[in-house]
């Protein structure tokens, strides 16, 4: 057992930071508005405006770091860390001299390659400025990317010793709570925590995640806010999720700016008008905004309490009752009682907790100083993890005190997930994970011209794949392996429901397009329920990655894209990291007649500065040249037999490295049997339901989740139950006194 101190804290500021930010935005928006709107603003944000320096410091929270350019070489040096030696002593005695031996020729003081001069690097990862460089050094040593193959290489024991030293120092920074670069909290940098450390020794003591506030997902906002006003129409949604093929629900990306705030403020005013208008069925709020005379003080207080329960799902505090009543009186003196009633309601709708999910930890404190989320916080956390609206069963359980223990939470989550009909919801959270993980819905966004001999209906292809995924989830056995290796796909999802003698029958529509030719099925293929799912030959299709929807999503408009496909496998199945294409690099593949795409790609990437990264991706992606950019199986490319041979390499995983494959199906079979690949999959599921990257402090949670998955014979439900009842989900760092 090892001990972990504080982990990398979340990037999200505390609640007050959100309020300050929203206030600044509102200050800009409110300029030139009516006194009524100004009064609403001052009531919601009653604190004094801070000075320029403080505002400037707070504004720095919104800055985004540029994308990481990974132009780093690798140190290969002998490093024997003597017990009792300090980091500085071991670095100066052993590491630094070997930097001179292996690295200074290319990365010295004079004209260093990649503009990286290692003669200035030191071994202080906590207080120094070179954390990011050491992080890249560790990765490239692990994958044997540096020193270059044509340079003098360190002995295996030298490489192992240096890896040990770097990993120890990197872990020290995480235990010390050092935030060296916020970019590592973004989803595209989720694989940077050492996998071996996460799934190695268990921690004897963990440090929980810090208190967090998440901005609600757009889907939650769309599902909950309009219902408050009996489905008011015409509302704008200024909330957005991350772009790109990553897990999108990350708290680190959720900041409001002027473009987002203005429509949200407009929505609040529109909803308030509807809730107090003549067509509203809410008698309490209609009474508050009537224009026949001032309501009694008791009626105003009752309306405030009613508005808080209806909008926020909780009772108003005494301070809130006093503050909102004073605001109502002030607004009434300015614009009348009807205006005051609507302004008051608008103020409730602008409370930060309408847009933010609070996870501050208001529950009990355990023996390690960790604060448990309150039962109400747990109810909302579970609701938003499993749906896009507060779930009655969790809210009722919290009110009844039935979310006090992890066992109670696990039981309720298990019950929720056991209802397989939830997979048929319009936007199920479980299915949404697989949408974001595999990114196959992007097939509908990639332009494809109409292929000869058929129709490329990407929407139907996506629906087909989702039907297959649902089927695998219903069985809930060896889910990842089935997703990677299944040879059974549902092809005809174009159904209509017909009632006959009290029974619901599913009958296929007549064939209208030949979209099924994407599966290499003949034009005269007969639609039949009895043929579903369709079984394909072993050498033709195996798993989600050979489905036309995924293949189309991870291809170009007119040609295949083995680099993209290989990068996905490298990151999402093998837990690696691949940098973006550096600025200034020409990534175009030459157009050569009668030359296969594989051969043209080899020409384009043969330069050393290109192959350094492509050798991590291309051997994994070229087996999928067995399919064209429509996802159709092909035996010829440019008139030549398709070369689908590939290799699993540079993973650092015993049993995987060096495995050569003859095609995509063999590749999927190998990866599906790997425990390491399972663990990487668990890491991605963790990020989806936690909304953040994993840290060393989550070691036990990840190991327990993986064990639950294995003990449940590859049950995705068991995996999710374990995560949502874990310490990482239920416990937070104890709040500090202001």
Image (spheres, grey):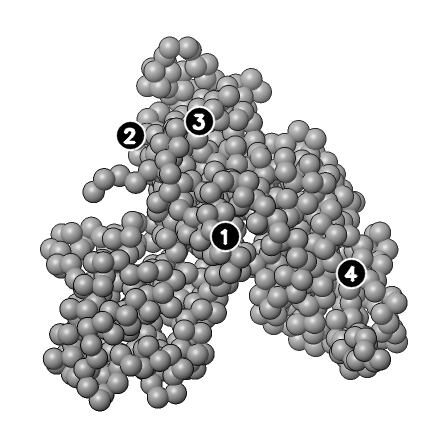
Q: Secondary structure at mark 1?
A: helix
Q: Are marks 3 and 4 in contact (CB under 8 Å)?
A: no
Earlier in the chain: of badge 2 and badge 4, it is 2
Earlier in the chain: of badge 2 and badge 3, it is 2
**Circle 2 residues within 10 Å: few <14, some 14–19, many ≥20:** few
Q: Secondary structure at mark 3?
A: strand
Q: Where does label 4 land, which residue?
A: 489
Q: Where does label 2 land, which residue?
A: 127
Q: Which residue is found at the position 40% from the left and 40% from the top?
A: 372
Q: Are marks 1 and 4 in contact (CB under 8 Å)?
A: no
Instruction: Tell me the quarter of the image containing the C terminus.
Output: top left
Q: Residue furthest top?
A: 83
> Percent position (x, y) of residue 628?
72, 62
Q: Secondary structure at mark 4?
A: strand
Earlier in the chain: of badge 3 and badge 1, it is 3
Q: CA distance from mark 3 to mark 4?
A: 46 Å
**Circle 4 residues within 10 Å: few <14, some 14–19, many ≥20:** many
Q: CA distance from mark 3 to mark 1?
A: 30 Å
Earlier in the chain: of badge 2 and badge 1, it is 2
> Percent position (x, y) of residue 669?
76, 43
Q: Where does label 1 land, which residue?
A: 397
Q: Which residue is found at the position 68% from the left and 45% from the top?
A: 715
Earlier in the chain: of badge 3 and badge 4, it is 3
Q: CA distance from mark 1 to mark 4?
A: 40 Å
Observer-side mark, 3 or 4, equals 3
- Residue 357, quarter of picture: bottom left
Q: Is residue 194 left or right of residue 9?
A: right
Tell me if residue 497 comes above or below residue 481 in the rendering.
below
Q: Is residue 687 left or right of residue 515?
A: left
Q: CA distance from mark 2 to mark 4?
A: 54 Å
Q: Where does label 3 land, which residue?
A: 205
Residue 85 disc label: none
């Amino acid at each position: 057992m090892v001990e972990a101190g504080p982990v990398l804290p979340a990037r999200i500021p505390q609640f007050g930071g959100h309020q300050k930010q929203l206030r600044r935005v509102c200050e800009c928006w409110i300029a030139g508005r009516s006194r009524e709107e100004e009064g609403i603003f001052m009531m919601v944000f009653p604190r004094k405006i801070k000075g320029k320096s403080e505002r400037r410091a707070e504004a720095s929270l919104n800055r985004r770091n540029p994308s990481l350019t990974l132009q780093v070489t690798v140190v290969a040096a002998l490093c024997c860390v003597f017990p009792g030696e300090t980091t500085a002593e071991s670095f100066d005695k052993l590491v630094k001299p070997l930097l001179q031996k292996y690295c200074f020729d290319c990365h010295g003081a004079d004209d260093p390659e990649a503009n990286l001069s290692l003669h200035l690097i030191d071994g202080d990862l906590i207080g120094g400025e070179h954390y990011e460089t050491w992080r890249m050094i560790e990765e490239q040593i692990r994958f044997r990317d540096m020193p270059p193959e044509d340079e003098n290489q360190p002995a295996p024991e030298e490489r192992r010793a240096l890896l040990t030293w770097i990993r120890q120092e990197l872990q020290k920074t995480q235990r010390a709570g050092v935030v060296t670069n916020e970019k590592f909290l973004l989803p595209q940098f989720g694989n940077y925590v050492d996998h071996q450390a996460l799934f190695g020794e268990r921690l004897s003591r963990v440090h929980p995640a810090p208190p967090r506030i998440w901005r609600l997902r757009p889907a939650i906002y769309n599902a909950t806010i309009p219902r408050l006003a009996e489905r008011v129409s015409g509302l704008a949604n200024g909330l957005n999720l991350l772009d790109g093929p990553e897990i999108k629900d990350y708290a680190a990306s959720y900041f409001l700016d002027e473009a987002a705030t203005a429509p949200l403020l407009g929505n609040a005013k529109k909803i308030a008008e509807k809730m107090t208008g003549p067509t509203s069925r809410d008698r309490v709020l209609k009474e508050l905004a009537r224009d026949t005379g001032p309501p009694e003080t008791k009626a105003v207080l009752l309306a405030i309490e009613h508005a808080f329960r209806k909008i926020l799902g909780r009772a108003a505090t005494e301070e809130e009752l006093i503050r909102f009543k004073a605001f109502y009186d002030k607004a009434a003196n300015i614009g009348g009682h009807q205006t005051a009633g609507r302004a008051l309601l608008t103020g409730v709708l602008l409370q930060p907790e309408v847009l933010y999910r609070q996870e501050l930890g208001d529950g009990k404190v355990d023996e390690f100083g960790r604060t448990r989320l309150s039962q109400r916080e747990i109810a909302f956390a579970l609701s938003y993890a499993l749906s896009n609206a507060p779930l009655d069963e969790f809210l009722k359980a919290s009110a009844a005190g039935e979310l006090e223990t992890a066992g109670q939470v696990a039981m309720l989550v298990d019950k929720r997930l056991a209802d397989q009909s939830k997979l048929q919801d319009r936007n199920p959270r479980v299915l949404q994970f697989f949408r974001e993980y595999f990114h196959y819905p992007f097939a509908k966004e990639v332009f494809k011209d109409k292929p000869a001999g058929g129709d490329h209906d990407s929407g139907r292809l996506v629906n087909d794949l989702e039907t297959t995924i649902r089927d695998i989830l219903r069985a809930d056995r060896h889910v990842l392996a089935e997703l990677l290796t299944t040879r059974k796909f549902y092809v005809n999802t174009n159904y209509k429901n017909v009632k006959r003698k009290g029974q619901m029958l599913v009958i296929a529509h007549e064939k209208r397009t030949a979209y099924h030719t994407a599966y290499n099925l003949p034009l005269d293929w007969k639609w039949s329920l009895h043929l579903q799912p369709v079984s394909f030959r072993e050498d033709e299709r195996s798993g989600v990655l050979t489905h036309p929807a995924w293949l189309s999503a991870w291809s170009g408009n007119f040609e295949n894209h083995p680099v993209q496909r290989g990068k996905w496998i490298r990151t999402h199945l093998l837990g690696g990291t691949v940098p973006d294409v550096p600025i200034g690099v020409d990534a175009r593949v030459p157009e050569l007649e009668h030359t296969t795409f594989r051969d043209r790609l080899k020409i384009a990437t043969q330069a050393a500065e290109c192959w350094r990264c492509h050798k991590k991706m291309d051997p994994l992606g070229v087996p999928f040249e067995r399919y064209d950019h429509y996802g159709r199986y092909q035996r010829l490319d440019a008139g030549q037999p398709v070369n689908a041979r590939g290799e699993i390499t540079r993973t650092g995983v015993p049993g995987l490295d060096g495995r050569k494959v003859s095609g995509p199906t063999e590749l999927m079979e190998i990866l599906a049997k790997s425990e390491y690949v399972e663990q990487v999959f668990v890491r991605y599921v963790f990020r989806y339901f936690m909304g953040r990257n994993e840290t060393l402090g989550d070691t036990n949670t990840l190991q327990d989740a993986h064990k639950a998955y294995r003990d449940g014979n590859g049950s995705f439900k068991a995996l999710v139950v374990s995560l949502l009842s874990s310490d990482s989900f239920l416990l937070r760092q104890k709040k500090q006194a202001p």
